[in-house]
Amino acid sequence: METTMSITAFQVPSPRSSMLVRRRIATYFVGGVEQIPGLLDALGCLVHDLSVDVRDGVRESTMTCAVLIDAAEVEPLLARLRDLPSVVSSELV
């Protein structure tokens, strides 16, 4: 009697230590449109739904956007933005 055995193996990916999250960020800054490239560089990640409000005669401008980043990177991202000389504040919305 001949016995045939079949084994099927599946490779299950290990769970990631953290997952990507979508967060909306509002950043208030001074210095007008000249500051926008530096703000985008400080984000350093994929940006969605970017909106910038710069008005004549208003001291502070606003940049809001959605970002998709690792959950552990949210606070360091906000800290990078807050460290820019032109940024008054940056926060989750």
Image (cartoon, rainbow, N blue to C red):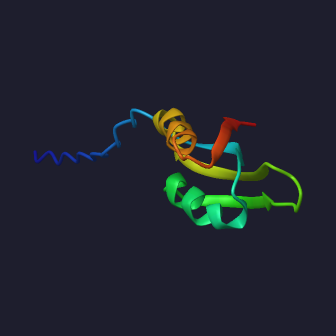
Q: Position of residue 50 (x, y in %)?
A: 72, 60
Q: Is residue 71 above or below residue 69?
A: above
Who is closer to the viewer here, 55 or 76?
Answer: 55
Residue at the spot 14% in from the left edge and 45% down from the top edge: 3
Q: Is residue 7 above or below residue 44?
A: above
Q: Position of residue 79 (x, y in %)?
A: 52, 36
Asked which quadrant contains residue 87, the reply is: top right
Say left or right for 89 vs 53.
left
Count of all numbered marks drawn on residues in the image: 0
Residue at the spot 46% in from the left edge and 33% down from the top edge: 72
Who is closer to the viewer here, 10 or 71?
Answer: 71
Who is closer to the viewer here, 64 or 83?
Answer: 83
Farthest residue, direction left: 1
Asked which quadrant contains residue 82, the reply is: top right
| Quadrant holding the N terminus | top left
Residue at the spot 30% in from the left edge and 46% down from the top edge: 11
Q: Position of residue 76 (x, y in %)?
A: 47, 37
Say left or right for 9 vs 43.
left
| Quadrant holding the C terminus | top right
Residue at the spot 23% in from the left edge and 48% down from the top edge: 6
Q: Position of residue 9 (x, y in %)?
A: 27, 45
